[in-house]
Amino acid sequence: MFERSFLGRWGGSGAAALPVVLVIGSVVLELTLVSSFVAYTLSQSGFGERASTEALFVARSGAMDAIRKVVRNKDFADADGYTLTVGDKTASVTVTKDSPTTGQTRVVATGTAWLRQKKIQADLTVNATTGEVNLVSFEEIDL
C-alpha cells in the first residue's frame, strides 16, 4: 500500500516513457539524415549534368576550331594534338590526315569540365586539288 501511494496514481509508468522517447528521437534523427542525403544527392546530380553539358560544348568548340583550321589549310594535321582553352575548361584536339581512309581527315576533340569528359569525332573529306572540305560526320562518341 505504501508503494502505491509513493509512485502516484500511474503506478510507475514513467519508466516506460523513456523507451518511447528514445524511439521517437531515433526516428526523427533518421528522417533528418535521410532528408539531408537526398538533398545532397539531388544537388550533386544537377552539378554533374551541368558539367557534362559544359564538357560536350567544350568538345564541340575544339572540333569546330580544328575544322576551321582544315578549311583554312587543306594540309593541316596535328596527330600529337593541341589544347584549346574555352573559359576555364579545356579541349584536347587531334587532327589526323588520311584517316580513316585516304582523302579524309579525322578530328577528335575531348572536352573536359571538372571531372566530366565528352568526346566529339568529325570526319571530313578534303579535295587535294581544290582544297574543298566537306563534313562527312560530326558526332559524340563514347570515351
Image (cartoon, rainbow, N blue to C red):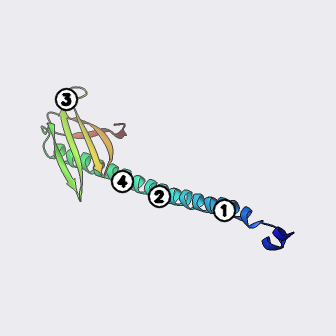
Q: CA distance from mark 3 to mark 4?
A: 33 Å
Residue highlighted by disc 4: 51
Label 4 and label 1: CA atoms lie apart by 41 Å
What residue sits right under mark 3 in the picture? 98
Outermost right residue: 1
Tell me whether the residue at label 4 lies in contact with that at label 1, contact meaning CB atoms closer than 8 angstroms.
Answer: no
Secondary structure found at label 3: loop
Choose mark 3 or mark 2, whichever is in front: 2
Q: Spatial distance from mark 4 to mark 2, Cα to Cα?
A: 16 Å
Q: Position of residue 27 (x, y in %)?
A: 63, 59
Of marks 3 and 1, which one's residue comes earlier in the chain? 1
Secondary structure of the residue carrying tag 1 is: helix
Q: Quadrant of the N terminus?
A: bottom right
* Residue indicated by mark 1: 24
Inspect the image, locate mark 3, and give the three-letter code of the amino acid beneath it: Asp
Q: Amino acid at mark 4?
A: Ala
- Could you say whether the residue bearing mark 4 is in a helix, strand or loop? helix
Label ID, residue 40: 2
Q: Nearer the viewer, residue 70 or 142?
A: 142
